[in-house]
Image: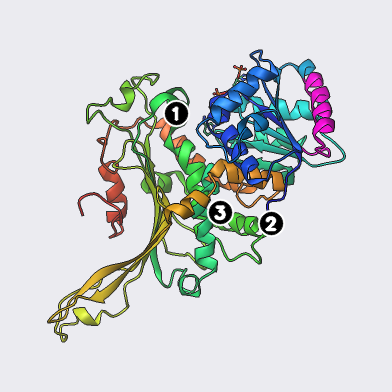
Amino acid sequence: MATENKAVITLFGATGDLAKRKLYTALFKLYQKGYLADHFALLGTSRRPLTDEEFQQIVRESISNIPETENGQAEAFSKHFFYKSHDVTKPEHYEILKQRLAELDEQFGAEGNRLFYMSMAPQFFGTIALNLKKQGLLTDNGFNRLVIEKPFGRDFESAKKLNDELSQTFSENQIFRIDHYLGKEMVQNIQALRFGNTMIESLWNNRYIDNIQVTLSEKLGVEERAGYYDQSGALRDMVQNHIMQIVAQLAMEQPVAFTDADVRVEKIKALRSLRLYTPSEAAANFVRGQYDAGDGTNAYRHEDGVDPESGTETFVAAKLMFDNYRWSGVPFYVRTGKKLADKFTRIDVVFKKPLIDIFANPRSESDQSLNSNVLTIFVEPNSGFAIQLNAKRAGQGFTTEPVDLRFLQSDSDKKESPEPYERLFHDALEGNHTNFASWAEIAYAWKFVDVIRKLWDIEKPQFPNYTPGSMGPAASDELLARDGRKWVYRLNH
Ligand SMILES: NC(=O)c1ccc[n+]([C@@H]2O[C@H](COP(=O)([O-])OP(=O)(O)OC[C@H]3O[C@@H](n4cnc5c(N)ncnc54)[C@H](OP(=O)(O)O)[C@@H]3O)[C@@H](O)[C@H]2O)c1
């Protein structure tokens, strides 16, 4: 039985793309499940003038693709939505918001609980937070929480400045920094897989694991996000946040308990032991790429809104090392890119081969050599995992062959799984930080990424260097080949 969350949500950027595509649908699903019911209201704001009715109509349109579970449900849900035109840079507007929030709190019995959601361009985050405090929009009798969209800064300096600004109004345990990858079912399942299974956790170290590979592959190009993306690139857009969060979950020690505070402590410790490269080490351990024309589509540099001379990377591969007892000597290879062969996210954990391969021994009757065991964690589009083992091929003689044990989430499981934004909204309403990035994690991630960013900003790249439909530039394969390794997922193997 769902427990109802009581709160007034203030949504900055209520007419924006994210709100319309993701946030209203996430809230509607929470409403259908009973996590939101009579005691919630949402006050949407942005500059354009709208009446409450017009805003409610926008909300109904945004959720129109979700079937109602009761007649009139969408209409009833939309009646919890209200709107005030507001320019976040104008302090006088906050007074109007303040009054309206107090009225809605009273009307819906939200008991002073306030959730402020910043779904706007990041340059406004600091201003909004400062004004919320100065103009007295926080309550004394309920919770005050801030949910903030990515990107969190462009480098360590700007992230720190933003964090300092937010910290003047909100303490760390009131801030929920969105990384929607952390809302995905299988990313959360990494912890169940590791800490719920002796078979896996007992082997989860440098004695048994040879290397770990994380791939976030996108099939599409830059599409309509060119303006943002050309200023960001794959390193900032994907590596600093999503990839670092996944890697932290893979590398962390077992938390004392499965609570948000305990998990955070371990993720931070893991990121603290990530080796910070010198500039020359970073140059050797990072690869960048940019897609060319192909398959009848434009090269990145000829996409609408992209500088024709752009040096922005649409692909990154890197080798990460952790200097701690568990992982010393085990490389974590990561890669992400646009216009690659397919859209998927997966993690491949490659185990060491047996110390002695008796099947390859000249005295044995077989000259078969063994494959490495591989645990593959599928994050998307399908959630699940596979374990590759060596087994005897049926029949005369003796040869081994790799066999796959596989579990993929069923369609009915998939239906049960909330979308990332639904899960994250609910977590924020519950005050659960497990699936949000803490400031310390973000700070370590930026410090790691800044070294290579500074280098790449100076050195002009030889772009374009990979074709659409490939798995990135040749240098990405060479990064592993140098260590005598290969990507587990590769084309034509
Ligand atoms: N869209 C996505 O899929 C996506 C994915 C991940 C993260 N994000 C992040 O989510 C945030 C929002 O993205 P978005 O795509 O929804 O942006 P967007 O479509 O550009 O929406 C921006 C919103 O801010 C409002 N706004 C702009 N200037 C304002 C001002 N001075 N005062 C008050 N309101 C103002 C706009 O309405 P008015 O013009 O009427 O003021 C609009 O509602 C960004 O941080 C983005 O990086 C977005």
Mark 3 or mark 2, earlier in chain? 2
The stretch in magenta equals 94-114
Q: Give the Cα distance between marks 1 and 2.
A: 33 Å
* Secondary structure at numbered mark 1: helix
* Residue that carries the numbered disc 1 in the rendered image: 229
Quadrant of image for the N terminus: bottom right
From the viewer's perspective, tell me whether residue 157 is left or right of residue 144.
Answer: left
Pointers 3 and 1 in contact (C-beta within 8 Å): no
Percent of width and height locating residue 403:
28, 69
Residue closer to the observer: 461 or 470? 470
Q: Residue furthest right?
A: 140
Q: Amino acid at mark 3?
A: Leu
Q: Is residue 98 magenta?
A: yes
SS state under label 2: helix
Q: As drawn, which residue projects farthest toward the bottom?
A: 363
Label located before the other in sequence (1 or 2): 1
List x then y, in percent, for residue 320: 44, 53
Q: Quadrant of the C terminus?
A: bottom left
In this rendering, does residue 375 appear at all?
Answer: no
Location of mark 2 (residue): 261
Residue depicted at x 37% and y 47%: 284
Which quadrant of the figure has residue 149? top right
Apparent side of residue 436 relative to residue 110 in the rendered image (left or right): left
Q: Which residue is mark 3?
A: 271
